[in-house]
Amino acid sequence: DAGVIQSPRHEVTEMGQEVTLRCKPISGHNSLFWYRQTMMRGLELLIYFNNNVPIDDSGMPEDRFSAKMPNASFSTLKIQPSEPRDSAVYFCASSFPPTANEQFFGPGTRLTVL
Amino acid sequence: AQTVTQSQPEMSVQEAETVTLSCTYDTSESDYYLFWYKQPPSRQMILVIRQEAYKQQNATENRFSVNFQKAAKSFSLKISDSQLGDAAMYFCAYSGGATNKLIFGTGTLLAVQP
């Protein structure tokens, strides 16, 4: 299995631009998570899906952030418009809950907003 | 709300020696899981070890073991025979309740001295 795949690995954009981060979970996993990692706030959950349905989006910072999971093999996290404070590493993780809640992480996307 | 606390921002150990990283957590749940994740400079999140709260026996994975004290809500990680490749940020994480989202501590940066 290829593991969780994220693209792009690095993204540099200018303030005000739209940014779309992509994630392909491990085949067969039915839970998908988006995390953000910053020096100030550490690792924090933004949103998670179960069977393609958003279950908890309380971690989404504001309306500029949106996430979708149109099918079991693809999810996007969109920021529009982006701001410098959105600069962070964004991780996608997937899991199959019966396996002791273990989550498998993608390599992350490092986002820099100038 | 559940919380995870790592009180050691940085630790250092000599190669081949043993080091223990501390973690405490707070929860009102009776059924939950605890994890240690390793994040090397590549930023990939790697699961090191996990513990099911209902199991009294401490988990062990090769050179890595935990000391799980449920009553004290303590979950420390012991790394034996430390190797240069163990140098990384280590995160303690909790998962429990109706969801399997992870709540992370702030991390401990481990340096291994040759």
Image (spheres, rainbow, N blue to C red):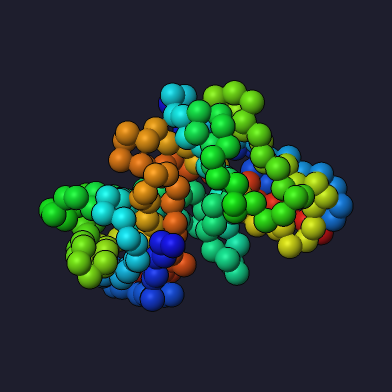
- Tally the marks: 0
Residue B18 in view in this figure: no
Nearest the camera: A41 or A57?
A: A57
For the view shown, which residue lies furthest in the left direction?
A: B57
Residue located at (20% from left, 67% from top): B71
Q: Position of residue B8 (x, y in %)?
A: 38, 76
Residue located at (41% from left, 61% from top): B2
Residue located at (37% from left, 60% from top): B92
| Side of A30 where A100 appears, left or right | left
For the N terminus of chain A, which image quadrant? top left
Nearest the camera: A49 or A28?
A: A49
Residue A56 in view in this figure: yes
| Side of A2 where B81 appears, left or right | left
Nearest the camera: B18 or B75?
A: B75
Q: Position of residue A87 (x, y in %)?
A: 70, 58
| Side of B112 where B18 appears, left or right | left
Nearest the camera: B81 or B104?
A: B104
Q: Position of residue B77 (x, y in %)?
A: 27, 63
Residue A74, above or below B51:
above
Residue A1, above or below A54:
above
Q: Position of residue B35 (x, y in %)?
A: 33, 53
For the C terminus of chain A, which image quadrant? bottom right
Residue located at (36% from left, 50% from top): B96
Residue B66, above or below B11:
above
